[in-house]
Image: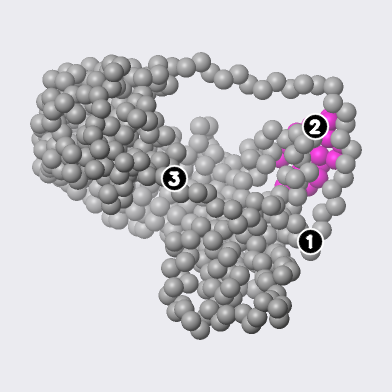
């Protein structure tokens, strides 16, 4: 058997197709296309891993033709990551990587490939030069040259992706020329600008979703016009909400259902703007500027369809009553990260219970739980399906940064970059057929009680011991830890806790014990951990 690698430019997936030539000794190849229906090959795309997909492509070329549009659908590159921690050991491979990105951008605009692309996620450099001075690498300029080529090609060809519906871009300048390219994308619905400097701030795009985020101010003067108020369904902004509100003026946002922002400075302007969003269903306000005064009340006729609120307690207490709120996430007030008393949370939950609809999801800010307070809160919401409580953890020491050891000689190597052979030498991992073994299933027959005690473990003791009754319809229970915790549940204790919770809450489908590494989800009669991929069956 001999194989030939066919170069592809399929964005995120980026795997090669290997064609096998069968010798007469092996007999004629099996015509799998005639034996199996097209629907089965499409199911393979959904159920198989990337390496399994390569094997399917070996035996059926019709699968390759069916999957090709799917392979090109989502594209991305991250130039910023390539410039981080550049050394003599990795700079050549990274130059080749960014060169392949440049070639891929050229080839995507050839033939029908550009019409397949529906999503672009791109990250550029936060400075004008990709990498700075590297005295130990003589030809580092190759990196900057390839970076400039990628930027120029992307800007020049963006207008050719006529079916593009989603664009996420980071570390870039949105100037008049780029805004013109965006205007030509008639199918663009989702735009995310992350740490982008916006120099061209006028002209509405017919977007459904707009996200503007970044730590630094990206635009300094006048109203900011990006998305048309008549088409928007979702807005997420960090610090530019007042500029966007000014850009909308008095226009009604008839289709807006989700609004998210960071710290609010102009409170009066915000609540006036909420009156322009009659169909708003979800509101996220992560904080109010210190010293701002909230209105004493907001009439129920303002955002009457609101059903999800995330924000500090005073915002939630102001908006939850007399609205059909079914989901609440309580954050710290005024940007504070301090612990709140359970008695205070009980008073907040009393106001939440005045909602005109049953509460299904509740996430509480950091606290030290007490049995009486938790029992009072859960009794307020008998229909609760999701409950998240954050408890304090012990902070660990920060890891030290790696130090640079000087004295290395200058790397004088040169890289020959040829567009025709850019994809002729894939990495071994891209063509490997190795599969991870499925973890064994551990049978858990009964619950054991943890020996150590802490606020974190004590809460599970209350639950498993029957002292704290959870809502009967509970489906998701998350116990998160603020900071590094030395008192999490061991693996054996997690098994026991899942066994106990499964009996107490038959509808439970997800449990988190502290960190994401201890997140468990149920599939049928099996519980599976997302990080370590352990699987257990409760008998």
Q: Quadrant of residue 339?
A: top left
Give the residue at x 58% y 65%: 55
Q: Earlier in the sequence, mark 2 or mark 1?
A: 2
Q: Please check the rendered image and state whether residue 216 is part of the magenta-colored stretch, yes or no.
A: no
What distance separates the C-alpha of mark 3 from that of mark 2? 45 Å
**The C terminus: image quadrant:** top left
The boundaries of the magenta stretch are 129-147
Q: Is residue 446 above or below residue 95?
A: above
Residue 388 is left or right of residue 425, and the answer is left
309 relative to 523, above or below = above
Disc 2 to disc 1, C-alpha distance = 28 Å
Magenta span main SS = loop
Residue 535 point in image, percent of width and height: 37, 43
Nearest to N terminus: mark 1 or mark 3 = 1
**Mark linked to residue 421:** 1
Q: Which residue is mark 2?
A: 134
**Percent of width and height locating residue 283:** 29, 41
| Relative to 387, 123 lies left or right | right
Tell me if label 3 and label 2 are in contact, CB under 8 Å.
no
Against 335, is 521 above or below? below
């Amino acid at each position: 058997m001999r194989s030939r690698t066919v170069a592809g430019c399929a964005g995120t997936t980026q795997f090669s197709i290997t064609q096998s030539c069968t010798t007469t000794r092996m007999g004629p190849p099996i015509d799998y296309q005639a034996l199996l229906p097209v629907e089965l090959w499409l199911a393979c795309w959904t159920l198989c891993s990337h390496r399994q997909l390569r094997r399917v492509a070996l035996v059926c070329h019709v699968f390759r033709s069916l999957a090709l549009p799917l392979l090109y659908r989502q594209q991305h590159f991250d130039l910023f990551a390539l410039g981080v921690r550049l050394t003599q050991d990795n700079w050549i491979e990274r130059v080749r990587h960014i060169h392949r990105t440049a070639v891929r951008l050229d080839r995507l605009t050839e033939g029908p490939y550009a019409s397949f692309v529906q999503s672009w996620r791109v990250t550029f450099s936060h400075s004008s030069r990709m990498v700075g001075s590297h005295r130990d690498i003589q030809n580092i300029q190759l990196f900057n040259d390839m970076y400039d080529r990628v930027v120029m090609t992307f800007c020049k060809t963006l207008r050719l992706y006529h079916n593009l519906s989603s664009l996420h871009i980071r570390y870039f300048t949105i100037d008049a020329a780029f805004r013109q390219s965006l205007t030509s994308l008639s199918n663009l619905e989702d735009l995310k600008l992350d740490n982008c400097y916006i120099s061209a701030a006028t002209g509405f795009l017919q977007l459904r979703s707009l996200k503007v985020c970044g730590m630094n101010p990206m635009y300094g003067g006048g109203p900011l016009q990006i998305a048309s108020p008549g088409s928007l369904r979702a807005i997420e902004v960090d610090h530019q909400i007042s500029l966007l509100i000014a850009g909308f003026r008095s226009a009604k946002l008839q289709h807006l259902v989700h609004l998210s922002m960071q710290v609010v400075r102009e409170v009066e302007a915000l609540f006036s703007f909420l009156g322009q969003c009659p169909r708003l269903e979800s509101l996220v306000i992560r904080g109010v500027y210190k010293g701002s005064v909230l209105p004493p009340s907001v009439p129920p006729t303002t955002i009457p369809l609101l059903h999800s609120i995330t924000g500090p307690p005073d915002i939630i207490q102001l908006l939850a009553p007399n609205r059909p709120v079914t989901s609440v996430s309580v954050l710290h007030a005024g940007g504070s990260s301090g612990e709140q008393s359970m008695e205070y949370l009980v008073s907040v939950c009393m106001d939440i219970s005045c909602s005109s609809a049953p509460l299904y999801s509740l996430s509480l800010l950091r606290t030290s739980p007490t049995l009486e307070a938790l029992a009072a809160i859960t009794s307020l919401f008998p229909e609760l399906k999701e409950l998240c409580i954050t408890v304090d953890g012990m902070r660990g020491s920060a890891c030290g940064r790696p130090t640079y050891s000087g004295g290395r000689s200058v790397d004088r190597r040169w890289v020959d970059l040829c567009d025709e052979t850019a994809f002729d030498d894939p990495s071994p991992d891209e063509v490997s057929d190795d599969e991870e073994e499925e973890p064994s299933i551990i049978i858990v027959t009964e619950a054991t009680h943890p020996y150590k005690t802490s606020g974190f473990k004590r809460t599970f003791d209350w639950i498993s011991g029957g002292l704290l009754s959870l809502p009967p319809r509970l489906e998701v229970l998350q116990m998160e830890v603020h900071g590094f915790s030395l008192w999490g549940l061991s693996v054996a204790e997690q098994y026991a806790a899942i066994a106990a919770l499964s009996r107490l809450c038959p509808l439970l489908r997800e449990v988190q014990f502290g960190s994401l590494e201890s997140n468990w989800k149920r599939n049928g009669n099996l519980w599976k951990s997302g990080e370590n991929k352990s699987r257990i069956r409760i008998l």
